[in-house]
Image: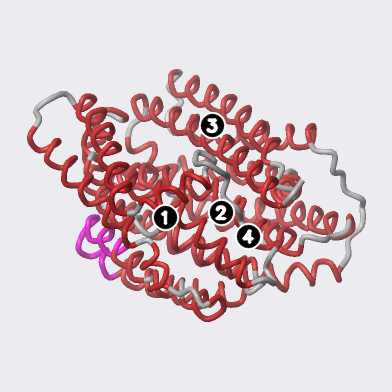
Amino acid sequence: MTLQKKTMNAAKWSALDIFARQGLQFAVSIVLAHILAPEDFGVFAMLALFIGAAGIFIDSGFSSALIQRQNTTLADESTVFLFNLAMGAMTALLLSAVAPWIAAFFKRPTLQYLTYVMAFNLFVNAFGAIHNTLLSREMNFRTIARVGVVSSVVAGVVAIYMAREGYGVWSLAGQTVAAGIVTVVLLWLWHPWRPVWVFSLSSMRACFRFGGYEMAAALTDVFSTNLYLIIIGKMYSIRDAGFYDRAQRTQQLPIMVMMGIINRVAFSVFSMVAEDRERLARGLRRAQALSMFMHLPIMVGIIILARPIVLVLFGPQWLSSVPILQVLGLGGLFWPMHVLNLTILKAQGRADLFFWITICKKTLTISLTVAASFYGVMAIAWMLSAVSLLTYFVNTHYTGKFLAYGGWRQLSDLAANFLSVIPMAVAVYFMVAKTHVPPFVQLVLGGILGGAIYLLTCRLMCEKLLNECLQIMGIGKRAAQIS
């Protein structure tokens, strides 16, 4: 199979996996939002920083290192597997040890026992990490999709049952643990890889040369991303943290779907052609054309239709998350371009530069977030969105240096696409402002009207880009080529 066909097939299954998994999880979250209180989501969100950091320590960047290296031995892979198990056990014990402190800090005794359960889940997940990595490197997203759908269905059923039985926040923990156990079991059943009991220090050092930077960058990212939830929960209320978490998860859903489809495939493909800078630049351009073509109208739609979205999906008890969702949506406009530029660096093996860029950005983000926290929850949202837009040129600096395809050139290639979304935004805004119909009707009308105007405007203003995006998606006259 040619690289082009392999990539298109991988993208198809990756898309199915992401749409099915994220769609199922989001559908479950909608049901849970009508059963549980915002405080329940806020309490669970308080653990995001600790669980996220622990998961990164367990992986230590070795998964990305295996994908980037492409050619590894069974000894290399077994070393990573044993390392993950050891780190999983150690991290779970450490997290359990600090559980009383976490509960005392937030004055929520339930957090102590929630932490114990989530620590156990981290250890369970370590058993399947290597299988998932190998499937991604092989671009075998068909198996990943099967695992994801089954685990999401089982976990969703568990969560909804527990919520209806009155378990409150524990239904969210039950969902996470059920998903983890089912995922690990299915990965071992459906993938033939088995470890040999060999631990190679040379293999670990080779992986850590790349993975160490990846781990440090990921830890910095997790800390800055979840810091605001800690600040809101401590300085304001757990309820406010629940509203913020709901707004962020809703804003991030299209981003996670989009980048889950594209970036998972892009990292593997970019790593295969890492030595050919011209092919890398062309691949980046096409990946951005596809992602931004779909991402921009969705994100603009979320900003304008935030109120009917929240009312229809979650109910009036979540209306306080509407302004937060709108501001965070503004900050997410450039997100695919951020991610893809950094993926190029990782694919070239420059995890060191990826690390220093992350440190630079997150230091700025943390400093400004702490300063903004004294002025309210909305000030935090505005500051995070402003930083997200401003740091675009930080992320594109080395792409311009290595591939001669910097930030301004990338924006120039997509300028017509950015302009094409303006008529859609104006039309949908006036439709919402001038019509007095139920939120569901507003949502449907906004989606149909906005989509039609966007496609028409793209046809008039950037037909070449529209056709290229359709080709990449396999809708055009011919499938797009990577090279």
Q: Earlier in the sequence, mark 3 or mark 1?
A: 3
Labels 4 & 2 near each other (Cβ < 8 A): no
Q: Determine whether the residue tagged by mark 2 lies in a helix, strand or loop.
A: helix
Q: What type is the residue that disc 1 sits on? A: Phe
Mark 2 and mark 3 in contact (Cβ < 8 Å)? no
Q: Main secondary structure of the magenta part?
A: helix
Q: Quick one: SS at disc 4?
A: loop
State the residue lying farthest toward the bottom.
401
Residue 436: x and y in percent read: 9, 27
> Which residue in the protein does label 2 denote?
263
Amino acid type of the residue tagged 3 in the rendering: Ala
Disc 3 versus disc 1: nearer the observer: 3
Q: Which range is magenta?
A: 371-385
Q: For residue 433, what is the image quadrant?
A: top left
Q: Which three-letter amino acid code belongs to the residue tagged 2? A: Asn
Residue 241 can be seen in this image = no
Q: Mark 1 points at which residue?
A: 105
Q: Residues within 10 Å of mark 3 (few under 14, many from 20)?
A: many
Depth check, mark 2 against mark 1: the one in front is 2
Pick whichever of labels 2 and 1 is earlier in the sequence: 1
Q: What element carries label 1?
A: helix
Q: Identify the residue position indicated by label 4 in the image.
A: 483
